[in-house]
Amino acid sequence: MPSREQLEQLLALDPTDAFLSYAVAMTCASEGDAGEAVTRLAQLVIDHPDYVPAWFQRGQLLAGLDRVEEARGVLSEGIVVARRVGDSHAEGEMIEFLESL
């Protein structure tokens, strides 16, 4: 698995790469920096609004930070996006997680 620094370097070469942006955010989360991960995922959905995994992960991280109302809003938006792009699996996962909050 590439390090955060390596991922950041790759992202610098192609800042429009949604997967690299997501990978950096997830690396931040795995390193215990959930706040930075949330910030990066928020930017990712601005830049790539149909990138469904970013919506779900952001909602989960927000819930983990006890920002439950914000998580509910993100998940609700993510469900709409997942439905629009035809990702029924992610839609179902987000609905289930939202109902658990």
Image: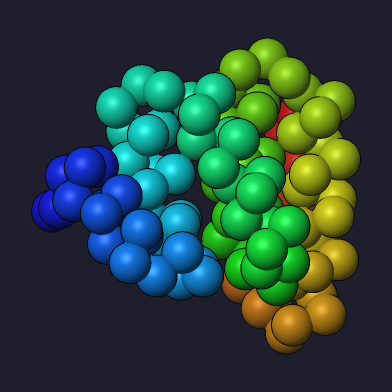
Question: Please, is residue 89 above or below residue 64 in the view?
Answer: below
Question: Please, is residue 27 above or below residue 22 in the view?
Answer: above
Task: Give x and y (percent) for residue 80.
Answer: 86, 66
Q: Out of 81 and 46, give the one closest to the viewer.
A: 46
How is the protein colored in the picture?
rainbow
Task: Give x and y (percent) for residue 4.
Answer: 24, 42
Is residue 19 visible in the rendered image? The answer is: no
Residue found at x 60% / y 35%: 39
The answer to which image quadrant residue 74 occupies is top right
Question: Please, is residue 100 above or below residue 17 in the view?
Answer: above
In this view, the residue farthest toward the front is: 13
The answer to which image quadrant residue 83 occupies is bottom right
In this view, the residue farthest toward the bottom is: 86
Residue found at x 18% / y 51%: 6
Residue found at x 85% / y 25%: 69
Q: Out of 56 and 35, give the one closest to the viewer.
A: 35
Question: Please, is residue 86 above or below residue 101 in the view?
Answer: below
Is residue 21 visible in the rendered image? The answer is: yes
32 sits to left or right of 38: left
Q: Looking at the figure, which quarter contains the C terminus?
A: top right
Task: Give x and y (percent) for residue 7.
Answer: 26, 53
Q: Out of 84 and 41, give the one closest to the viewer.
A: 41
The answer to which image quadrant residue 66 occupies is top right
Residue found at x 66% / y 78%: 87
Task: Give x and y (percent) for residue 31.
Answer: 29, 27
